[in-house]
Image (cartoon, helix red, strand yellow):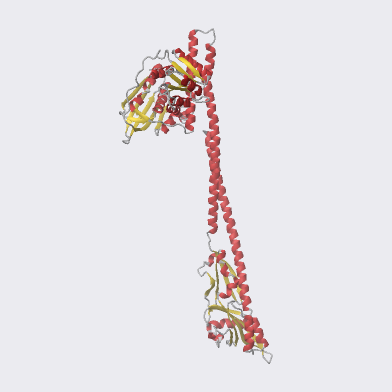
């Protein structure tokens, strides 16, 4: 049990370790994503800030071309010259709204004129919300940017004014006016590629504060929370713009990390399940090894007695009384060995899920009282008082597997008698309980005032081969009985519980429920009286491939006065029966496992023969296949009865006598 707990703890440890590693991997992955995303965000913001700044400045510095022409022509630029230069500067779909000359800050020429008519003749030094930028350009003697704001000619735009200074005849420099470019927003910024940012997974906002103190969103998402964005400064003439960039889905990294966590968790559970499966396989192998070790040990005990007392019985110097005592002990040890083999096979079949119940109609009182005689005889031999109380048991018919019920009851009752010293008491009480109309429920209590069980042993009571080693008491039996009882009770859908105290005794309580059945016969099987001599003069066909088993069967039948013809396999047996005269054989004894043709096939073959006695001759299975399923297979094959090996002479005589009467 300690090793099992350690193994379970190890499996749980593997799961905890895997889950911890999953969390660490997820945390590492999230941090890596976060840092990479932040790095990508900064890189994107820098690239697009520089693109925007380069684009705006490259456009506005085109005013230098027009300013140079003004200086070359000493401020007297003809319409033809202006148009030629303006056409050179102007570019289709560049966002340039107009190219203008502004002598004395008054717009006198514009290319194209269409769309700019509203500003012609305007003196921008006299327009309050434009004068400051104009004066700034004059004072700094450099390009000054105005806007963005709503243009006089309509739409949102920017104006870059390049101040032009000329020298008069006296050699004094004076302000001539401006060369200007007007940009439509946001069309002028399309070449910067800001519109591609949303497709790349980013939100952005390009904004500034104009000369009127207004915060203007030049392009992008007006609702963007710039406090959570990465900001970059776009340097434009005598102004600053700000480009704010942030991820469109700020939870993407967390969701990806949760996906990794889910995957790692699933992988951890898969690894844990694999470990548990390997652990269970290891436990199953260890349990199997321990099982066979226990079986080997427990089998050697009766085998030692059989071999030892057989040798002692052959000594010529012993008395007849001693020889009989030795042989009786050989017989008892053989019986214990048979019980051990039967119980071991039952446990094995139960572990493989091969035990099946075969309910048939039973009278409840007859079924529950059927164990009283044998238990009473056992108690009487041991000097133990046995009392059975079925007074509170209702008379009813139930659908139950009688053999399984009897096995459970006999095991509990025989244990109670076995572990109760002489002078003690064993009590067996069966009562009906309330149940649904379609079912009958029963309470079974088996109590004794025997030696009881220790607390440590009680924790392992239902484990195979569990036996309590108590000073002064010899462990009797296989140690498999209660394990089988528990499995049969579970299979029947019942419940079993117990209480015990050392020196005071033990009580087992059963609760069983069965479907009700049509009335079952309550009368015992008809008595066949004394069957000694009933088989004398009969003839039997024995189909048995094992020479020793055949020799034993022939000897037992010969003691009953039966003439025996033997066959070494099923096919030979069918041929012998077919070749015999009608009615010559009074019975057929059939082993099941034989070469060439097994007993089941042989029984079917005999029943299918076209002769009068083929359907009526008694066929008895005499085999080591002793489970209820094996018995049913024999009956389904056309056999009349089943006798288990090792052969009990009394059971064989009674069975055959009942069939040939």
Say if 2 sits above or below 310 in the image: below
Please state the horizontal and vertical placement of residue 385, each as a whole percent of the image: 37, 19
Say if 355 sits above or below 265 in the image: above
Relative depth, front residue between 67 and 522:
522
Task: Name the side, left or right, on which 112 lies relative to 373.
Answer: right
Residue drawn where x is 60% and y is 62% of the image: 40
Please state the horizontal and vertical placement of residue 67, each as a whole percent of the image: 65, 84
Relative depth, front residue between 122 and 346:
346
Please state the horizontal and vertical placement of residue 182, each as a whole percent of the image: 58, 80
Q: Is residue 305 visible?
A: no
Relative depth, front residue between 529 and 292:
529
Task: Name the side, left or right, on which 479 lies relative to 109.
Answer: left
Say if 355 sits above or below 541 in the image: below
- Count of numbered circles on the image: 0
Relative depth, front residue between 608 and 466:
608
Q: Quadrant of the C terminus?
A: top left
Looking at the image, the residue that sits furthest to the bottom is: 169
Residue drawn where x is 45% and y is 20% of the image: 588
Say if 80 sits above or below 362 in the image: below
Q: Is residue 550 visible?
A: yes
Please state the horizontal and vertical placement of residue 493, each as a whole percent of the image: 40, 34
């Amino acid at each position: 049990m300690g090793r099992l707990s350690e193994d379970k703890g190890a499996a749980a440890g593997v799961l905890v370790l895997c889950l911890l590693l999953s969390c660490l991997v997820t945390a590492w992955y999230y941090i890596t994503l976060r840092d990479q995303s932040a790095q990508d965000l900064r890189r994107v913001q820098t690239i697009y800030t520089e693109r925007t700044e380069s684009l705006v400045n490259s456009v506005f510095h085109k005013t230098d071309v027009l300013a140079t022409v003004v200086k070359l022509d000493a401020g007297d630029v003809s319409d033809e010259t202006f148009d030629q230069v303006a056409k050179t500067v102007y570019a289709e779909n560049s966002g340039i709204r107009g190219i203008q000359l502004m002598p004395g800050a008054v717009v006198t020429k514009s290319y194209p004129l269409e769309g700019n008519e509203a500003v012609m003749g305007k003196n921008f030094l006299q327009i309050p919300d434009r004068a400051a930028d104009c004066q700034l350009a004059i004072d700094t003697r450099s390009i000054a940017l105005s806007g963005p704001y709503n243009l006089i000619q309509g739409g949102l735009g920017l104006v870059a004014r390049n101040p032009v200074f000329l020298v008069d005849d006296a050699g004094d420099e004076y302000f001539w006016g401006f060369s200007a470019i007007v940009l439509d927003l946001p069309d002028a910024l399309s070449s910067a590629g800001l519109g591609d940012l949303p497709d790349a997974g980013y939100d952005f906002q390009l904004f500034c504060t104009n000369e009127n103190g207004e915060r203007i969103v030049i392009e992008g998402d007006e609702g963007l929370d710039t406090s959570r964005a990465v900001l970059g400064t776009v340097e434009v003439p005598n102004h600053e713009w700000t480009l704010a960039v942030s991820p469109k889905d700020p939870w993407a990294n967390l969701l990806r990390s949760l996906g990794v966590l889910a995957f790692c968790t699933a992988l951890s559970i898969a690894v844990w399940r694999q470990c548990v499966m390997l652990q269970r396989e290891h436990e199953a192998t260890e349990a199997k090894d321990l099982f066979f070790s226990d079986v080997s040990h427990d089998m050697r005990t009766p085998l030692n007695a059989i071999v030892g007392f057989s040798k002692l019985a052959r000594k010529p110097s012993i008395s007849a009384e001693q020889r009989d005592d030795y042989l009786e002990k050989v017989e008892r040890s053989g019986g214990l060995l048979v019980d051990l083999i039967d119980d071991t096979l039952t446990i094995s079949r139960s572990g493989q899920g091969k035990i099946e119940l075969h309910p048939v109609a039973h009278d409840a009182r007859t079924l529950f009282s059927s164990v009283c005689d044998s238990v009473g005889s056992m108690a009487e031999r041991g000097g133990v008082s046995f009392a059975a109380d079925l007074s509170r048991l209702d008379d009813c018919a139930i659908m139950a597997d009688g053999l399984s019920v009897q096995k459970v009851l006999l095991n509990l009752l025989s244990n109670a008698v076995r572990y109760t010293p002489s002078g003690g008491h064993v009590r067996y009480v069966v009562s009906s309980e309330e149940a649904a109309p379609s079912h009958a429920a029963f309470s079974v209590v088996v109590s004794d005032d025997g030696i009881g069980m220790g607390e440590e042993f009680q924790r392992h009571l239902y484990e195979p081969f569990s036996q309590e080693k108590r000073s002064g008491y010899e462990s009797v039996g296989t140690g498999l009985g209660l394990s089988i009882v528990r499995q049969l009770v579970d299979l029947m859908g019942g419940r079993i519980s117990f209480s015990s105290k050392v020196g005071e005794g033990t009580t087992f309580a059963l609760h069983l429920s069965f479907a009700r059945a049509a009335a079952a016969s309550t009368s015992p099987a008809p008595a066949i009286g004394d069957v000694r001599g009933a088989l004398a003069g009969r003839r039997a066909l024995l189909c048995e491939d094992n020479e020793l088993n055949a020799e034993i069967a022939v000897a037992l039948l010969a003691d009953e006065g039966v003439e025996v013809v033997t066959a070494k396999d099923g096919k030979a047996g069918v041929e012998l029966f077919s070749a015999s005269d009608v009615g010559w054989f009074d019975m057929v004894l059939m082993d099941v496992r034989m070469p060439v043709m097994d007993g089941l096939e042989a029984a079917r073959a005999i029943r299918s023969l076209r002769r009068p006695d083929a359907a009526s001759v008694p066929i008895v299975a005499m085999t080591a296949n002793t489970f209820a399923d094996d018995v049913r297979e024999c009956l389904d094959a056309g056999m009349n009865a089943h006798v288990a090996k090792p052969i009990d002479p009394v059971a064989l005589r009674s069975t055959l006598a009942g069939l040939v009467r």
